[in-house]
Image (cartoon, coloured by chain):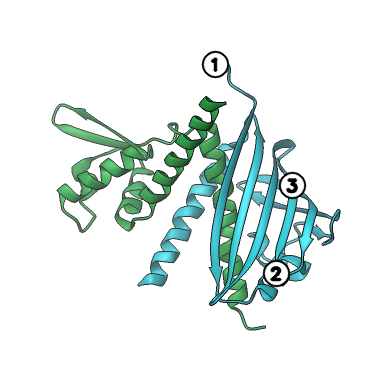
Chain colours: A cyan, B green
């Protein structure tokens, strides 16, 4: 079989936050708040972050990972206040577009706060797995797991 | 189409195995050690506070997840990191997933701050 240049994949991430949906939602809808967590950069960094939170509005942000600029270009497709955000976004590594995805964020009220369900359905293009980003990803995973572990102790 | 679905299911199982394999501190310590270069099973076990038998069990799980490969030459079994075993799709999912997992970690910390 010939190697395809586009691959499709879906994944889901579920998180619980001890915070009401209104407050979790505002961390997505308020640019000043979103900037604090969305990008790994410090808020004081000069990396661009622009967002226009309304259906049809756009968001543009980028970050540096091991010397390569990774850019997100997002369009808001659906917004239900405190309940749901749907976006379409492309990701660019250097000057190469690596993927185009559809992402849905659902904010479900729970007894302890909010269940966040993130579903990404993506089409990703040849060379999408930039080795630098991959390495960065694994390093982050290990860091993240180490922190989780430290919290448990 | 049936074949494609089968492929996706396989990928999913693989990803689940990878995350399961990484969900244990001893196995993470083994991966970290192996990321410096190939070592024998006994050298791999040395700095860890577990028995050699336990390390062999962990090694099996890591090998099944495709993260680690080992081969026996003479009487010594040598282990190494094996990330080439991932399909493009798996790599992509793992990468993108980590990006969002890290974001949602930061979101959790941000939400924990007082207003």
- B80 vs A123, left or right, is left
| The quadrant where residue A47 appears | bottom right
Q: Count all numbered tags in the image, as a single digit.
A: 3
Residue A27 point in image, percent of width and height: 70, 69
Mark 3 → mark 2, Cα distance in angstroms: 19 Å
From the viewer's side, name the closer residue of B100 and A135.
Answer: B100
Residue A35 point in image, percent of width and height: 72, 65
What residue is shown at x 65% (from left), y 61% (from top)?
A106
Label 1 marks which chain's residue? A
Report which residue position mark 3 lands on. Answer: A89
Q: Earlier in the sequence, mark 3 or mark 1?
A: 1
- Dot 2 and dot 1 residues touching (CB under 8 Å): no
From the viewer's side, name the closer residue of A120 and A132.
Answer: A120
- Dot 3 and dot 2 residues touching (CB under 8 Å): no
Report which residue position mark 1 lands on. Answer: A1
What residue is shown at x 53% (from left), y 32% (from top)?
B5
Label 2 marks which chain's residue? A
Q: With respect to residue A43, does A95 lie above or below?
A: above
- B103 vs B7, left or right, is right
From the viewer's side, name the closer residue of A140 and A113.
Answer: A113
- B67 vs A2, left or right, is left
Task: Tell me the number on the disc at residue B62.
Answer: none
The residue most toward the front is B2
Q: Secondary structure at mark 2?
A: helix
Task: Tell me the number on the disc at residue A25.
Answer: 2
Q: Secondary structure at mark 1?
A: loop
Rate crowding at label 1 as few (under 14), some (14 to 19) or many (20 or more) other CA atoms within 10 Å. Answer: few
Rate crowding at label 3 as few (under 14), some (14 to 19) or many (20 or more) other CA atoms within 10 Å. Answer: some
Q: Secondary structure at mark 3?
A: strand
Residue A32 point in image, percent of width and height: 76, 70
| The quadrant where residue A52 appears | bottom right
Rate crowding at label 2 as few (under 14), some (14 to 19) or many (20 or more) other CA atoms within 10 Å. Answer: many
């Amino acid at each position: 079989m010939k190697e395809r240049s586009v691959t499709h994949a879906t994944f889901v991430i579920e998180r619980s936050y001890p915070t009401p949906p209104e407050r979790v939602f505002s961390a997505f809808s308020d640019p000043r708040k979103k900037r604090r967590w969305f990008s790994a950069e410090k808020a004081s960094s000069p990396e661009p972050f622009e967002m226009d939170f309304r259906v049809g509005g756009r968001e543009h942000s980028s970050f540096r990972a091991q010397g390569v600029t990774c850019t997100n270009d997002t369009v808001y497709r659906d917004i239900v206040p405190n309940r749901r955000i749907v976006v379409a976004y492309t990701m660019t590594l250097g000057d190469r577009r690596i993927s185009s995805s559809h992402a849905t964020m659902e904010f479900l009220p729970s007894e302890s706060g909010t269940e966040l369900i993130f579903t990404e359905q993506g089409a990703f293009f040849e060379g999408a797995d930039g080795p630098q980003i991959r390495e960065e990803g694994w390093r982050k995973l290990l860091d993240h797991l180490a922190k989780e572990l430290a919290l448990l102790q | 189409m049936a074949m494609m679905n089968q492929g996706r299911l396989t990928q999913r199982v693989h990803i689940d195995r990878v995350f399961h394999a990484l969900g244990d501190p001893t196995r993470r310590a083994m991966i970290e050690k192996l990321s410096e270069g190939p070592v024998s099973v006994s050298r791999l076990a040395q700095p860890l506070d577990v028995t050699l038998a336990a390390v062999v069990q962990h090694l099996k799980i890591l090998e099944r997840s495709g993260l680690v490969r080992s081969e026996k030459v003479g009487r010594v079994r040598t282990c190494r990191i094996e990330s080439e075993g991932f399909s493009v799709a798996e790599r992509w999912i793992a990468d993108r997933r980590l990006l969002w997992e890290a974001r949602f970690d930061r979101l959790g910390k941000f939400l924990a701050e007082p207003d």
